Image (cartoon, grey):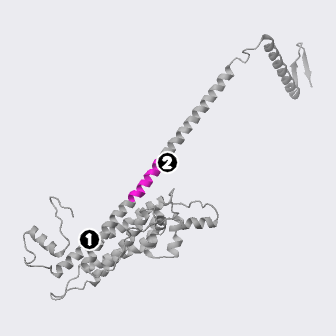
Amino acid sequence: MKESNNTKALPSDPLSYAQTLSTIISTPLLPPSATTAPSYLKRALSLSIGALSASAARSYSKAADAIAILSAERFSVDVNEWYGEAKFDIMRPHRGCMDSASKIRTALQGSKFAISQPKKGNAAAAASSEEEVSEAVKATRMVPQYHGPSKDMIHSNCATLELEMNCSEWNDGVELDDTIACLALQSILNGAVSLLDGSKSRSSTSSGEEGEVQSTVVSDLFSLSQLLSTTVSELKVVLEEEAKVGLNFITAEIEKETIEAKKKEEEKRKRAEAHAAKAGGGDAKADKDEFAGKSEAQIAKILKKRAEKEAKAAAKKAKKGGGTTAGAAGEVIITA
C-alpha cells in the first residue's frame, strides 16, 4: 500500500504490523518486551492477506478469457477448429472448459481474423509447419483447457477460504488447524500460476520458457499468503500487458482497413473522372468539322458516295415493304 495523506503502508510481518498499528492508534497491542506476535494475530493477518489476494485472483480469472480472445485474433486461431462445441461440450465436457470455450466462440463470431487459414503445400509440409508453431500460438489454442480448471479451482477455494475465515475456536485454549486454509490458498495459488504462465506465453512470440513461474508446495499459512500475494500481483501485470498487445493489434488493423478504404475510394474517384473526361472528349471530336483539310473535289466525292448509299438503302426498304420511291429523273416507279 502506498503512503499518502490519508493512508499508511502497514508491514505484512505480524510483529511489525502490531507495533506499527500500535503507534497509529496510540494503544499498545503487544507488551513492549514482546519478540514474537501471538499466533492468533499471525493467523488473522495471514488469512487477511490471503483472502485479499484470492479475491483479486478470482477477478483476474474472469478477465483472463476476454484478454485471451484478443490473442486468438492476433494469432488467427480458427475458432471452430480449436474452440468448437464438439471438442468440449461433447468430447471433453468439463464445466470450466466448456464455459471458457463458449465465451470465446461467442466473442469471436464474425471475426475477420480468428478463421481458418489456407494450408500451403502437401501434407508433409503442413505437418512440418505445425511443428514450427510458436509456444504463443499453442498457448492460445489451448486456452479453455487450462483456463477452465484454473477458474474452477480459484472460485471453489475462495468459497472454502471465506467459510474458514468465519470459523471460530471452540475455546480459548484451542487453536484452529491451518490445514484447510493452507490447502485452499495452495489451490488458488496453483490456479493463478496456471493463468500467469498461459498469459506469459501468449504475450510473447518466443518459444522459450524464461521466467516461467513454478508453483511450489508450501505448508505454512503465512508463507503461502505472501507467495499468493506476489503471484497475483504479477498476474495482474502480465494480463495487462497481454491486453495492451491485443488492443494494439486491433488498433493497427483498424488503421490499415481505414487507409485501404480511403485508397479504394480515391481510385474509384480517379476512374470516374477519367471516364467523364473520355466521354467529353468523344463528344467534342464528333462535333469537329469532318471535312477539315479536304479539297473541294474530295468533299464532292464523299457527298456523292453518301447519297448513293442512302438511295440504295431507301430502295431496299421500299422493295421489302412495297409502295413507291422516287427515281433519278423524278419519275415515279411502282414497285411490286
Picture coordinates of residue 128, whole percent (x, y): 58, 66
Q: Are marks 1 and 2 in contact (CB under 8 Å)?
A: no
Question: Is residue 186 left or right of 27 when viewed as pictured?
Answer: right
Q: Residues within 10 Å of mark 1 (few under 14, many from 20)?
A: some
Res. 68 image quadrant: bottom left
Q: Is residue 112 above or below residue 99?
A: above
Q: Residues within 10 Å of mark 2 (few under 14, many from 20)?
A: few
N-terminal of the pair, mark 1 or mark 2, is 1
Is 219 one of the magenta-colored residues? no
Picture coordinates of residue 8, whole percent (x, y): 16, 64
For the record, the magenta segment spans: 243-255
Figure label count? 2
Q: Which residue is mark 1?
A: 52
Is 250 one of the magenta-colored residues? yes
- The CA distance from mark 1 to mark 2 is 44 Å
Q: Which residue is mark 2?
A: 257
Q: Amino acid at mark 1?
A: Leu
